Amino acid sequence: MSLGLFSLCACQPKRVTDLASEAIFPKPQSVVATNSSFEVSAKTGINVLGESAEVLRIAEQLAAYLRPATGYAFNVSSVNDLSSNGNIILALNDTLKLGTEGYLLTIGEKSVLLQASQPAGLFMGVQTLRQLLPAGIELKEKQQGAWFFATGTITDFPEFEYRGGMLDVSRHFFSVDDVKRYIDFLATYKMNRFHFHLSDDQGWRIEIKSWPNLTVHGGSTQVGGGQGGFYTQDQYADMVRYAQDRYITIVPEIDMPGHTNAALASYAELNPKNKATDLYTGTEVGFSTLMTDKDITYRFVTDVLTELAALTPGEYIHIGGDESHSTKKADYIIFMNKVQDIVASLGKKAIGWDEIATANLLPGTLVQQWASVANAKLAVEQNARLILSPSTNAYLDMQYDSTTTIGLHWAGYVEVDKAYNWNPATLVEGVARENIVGVEAPLWTETVENIEHIEYLVFPRLIGLAEIGWSAPASRDFNDYRVRLAKHGQRLANQGINFYQSPLIDWQL
Ligand code: TNX
């Protein structure tokens, strides 16, 4: 593993003219080049058609992104028509039929027009625009030289509605700033869900006011015995807003009935014989369980999920359900059935790891497939939809190869090709395209201690997962991906991202 060895590159910007040869992630549905260029200059403004506060905010986000490296002002203003030469224009257009997140980007020599039927689509289009300027745009200091967009038209929309990334903050705790950086990574690649794994055996990370010892005691350590930590509800609300500003919905997870040692260590009454467990700082799984036949357990779950639901604007609460090896099968089913009811009573829908399909799924419950083909089939039989997170391809904590010094390999090594070369619609026997709501890449953190470790495992594999979620399956090809990724490396380096320099890619650094 190498840390911080990449050099920043100012890389004299050049006049680009071929939009079709730009490396864009995820690959757009359609790119038509017109072989000329638009120059971004000190006079370029960002115009918003109409006065939508949300579109003005997105325009400001674009301006904030472009200002440091160019040194230009990028004044944002509201206009009444589309005839504004020299400018970048953002416009809502409800005649477009590209869905909530789709956009149409038309780059001419005289103006750049980004249209979408919803603000979310404009946000997605802005992510594309960012990647159409040279890698130097990522630098925080003013760079020399001119800035060009190649001309043409991009028409784009996602393949799947759910495109997520997960971060486990229980095994190792990560600061609010680290979480925001992770959210930024997701947003850059047009992902729209952040699955926040907030509790596990090793740590409880979200303040629950009615059960304060969960964080006071249950949040006080982590794998290896470090000091752990937790988020106050105010900090959590701040992260929710940060994600919302980037069109990402947080899906919070309280993992149960297994993976609950941090809670069991915090409250004696949640245990048989009224005896609290010890805190746990190892990495074994499957030893803990809530008592599925006790009222106190359901009072606890109801209190926790009530507070969590109040902090959650999104429609889903993840209730875990994986690896409950210490819960009897019949008890597990009773428990997962009851907890789904609790979630429903709070006006939310549940997501569970694939084992939840052995229980009775409420209409609307999503099943997150990670290991068991049999469970995936049970889900389909119950007419549930699935999120695919196959551990053999989508797990970001799997090592790249036998030389990787962080991560695990129980599901095999996952090199950049393996992370990219799979098709959700054909991966799991018995699970067809229409059964799949989307894809998610989980990052479990037993071996992951800091943001550099996160970056090393996330990049570049997250980019591949994002493309699986967004791009047309027929357009995806590893050789084409490799070539684009080689060009993208400098962009990652300029952001100070500690990415894995896979030997499968001819990095142009
Ligand atoms: C399995 S994946 C788990 C996690 C571990 C992970 C490590 C899943 C639903 N459960 O508890 O962290 O393996 O890769």
Image (tube, rainbow, N blue to C red):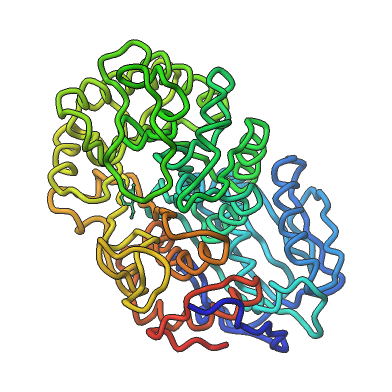
Q: Is residue 1 above or below residue 60?
A: below
Q: In front: 333, or 422?
A: 333
> Can you say which quadrant of the picture contains the C terminus?
bottom right
> As drawn, is 420 to the left or to the right of 455?
left
Q: Is residue 487 above or below residue 58?
A: below
> As drawn, is 463 to the left or to the right of 478?
right
Q: Quadrant of residue 401?
A: bottom left
Q: In front: 280, or 489?
A: 280
At 28% across and 57% down in the image, what residue appears? 391
Q: Quadrant of residue 324?
A: top left
At 56% across and 72% down in the image, what residue appears? 498
At 22% across and 34% down in the image, what residue appears? 326
Q: Is residue 298 above or below residue 162?
A: above
Q: In front: 86, or 165?
A: 165
> As drawn, is 150 to the left or to the right of 482?
right
* Percent position of residue 352, x then y: 32, 36
* Percent position of residue 504, x then y: 37, 84
* Percent position of residue 56, x then y: 75, 47
Q: Is residue 22 above or below residue 252?
A: below
At 22% across and 51% down in the image, what residue appears? 371
The number of discs equals 0
> As drawn, is 359 to the left or to the right of 229?
left
* Percent position of residue 460, x then y: 46, 71
